[in-house]
Image: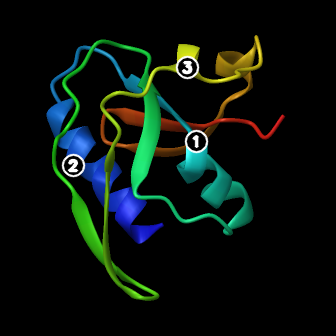
Amino acid sequence: MEAFTSLMQLQSEIVSSAPRPVRVIVAGGAAVHYWTRQLVTADVDAEFLERVMVTEEQVAYAAQGGRRSLYFDRNYHPSLSLMHEGYIGRAIQIAEIGNLQVLMLHPV
């Protein structure tokens, strides 16, 4: 979770000058890990609800079995997933980092 927070902080620096808060909905393995603490993933599947540049930075961290890195999957799009029709409205805000509102998919 520390690596996830660090990645979101890097992204918040990019969107700091946006005229309104930028919302990002986290899905995939990162969302599963948030709710269960069971799955480990190397990438963050995230949908930005506003048009923004997404950081290409990676965050390195120590994990069982060695060092790992966490980064945004720049190829992710929600149309590639089985999403509940109301997933945007059900997403739960878990953090606000500067001008970045971080929402997590609701575990429906």
Badge 2 density bin: few <14, some 14–19, many ≥20, Cα 10 Å: some
For label 2, the SS is: helix
Q: Quadrant of the C terminus?
A: top right
**84 relative to 70 in the view: left or right:** right
Q: Residue furthest bottom?
A: 65
Badge 3 density bin: few <14, some 14–19, many ≥20, Cα 10 Å: few
Q: Alpha-carbon distance for marks 1 and 2?
A: 20 Å
Q: Are marks 3 and 1 in contact (CB under 8 Å)?
A: no
Mark 1: amino acid: Gly
Q: Indicate the position of residue 101 as horizontal and vertical percent values.
A: 45, 34
Of labels 3 and 1, earlier in sequence is: 1
Mark 3: amino acid: Leu
For label 1, the SS is: helix
Q: Indicate the position of residue 65 as horizontal and vertical percent values.
A: 42, 88
Residue at x-position 62% and y-position 59%? 33
Find disc 2 in the rendering and name its residue.
10
Residue at x-position 16% and y-position 34%? 14
- Residue 80, which numbered label? 3
- Residue 28, which numbered label? 1
Q: Alpha-carbon distance for marks 3 and 1?
A: 11 Å
Residue at x-position 66% and y-position 52%? 32
Of labels 1 and 2, earlier in sequence is: 2
Q: Indicate the position of residue 13 as horizontal and vertical percent values.
A: 17, 41
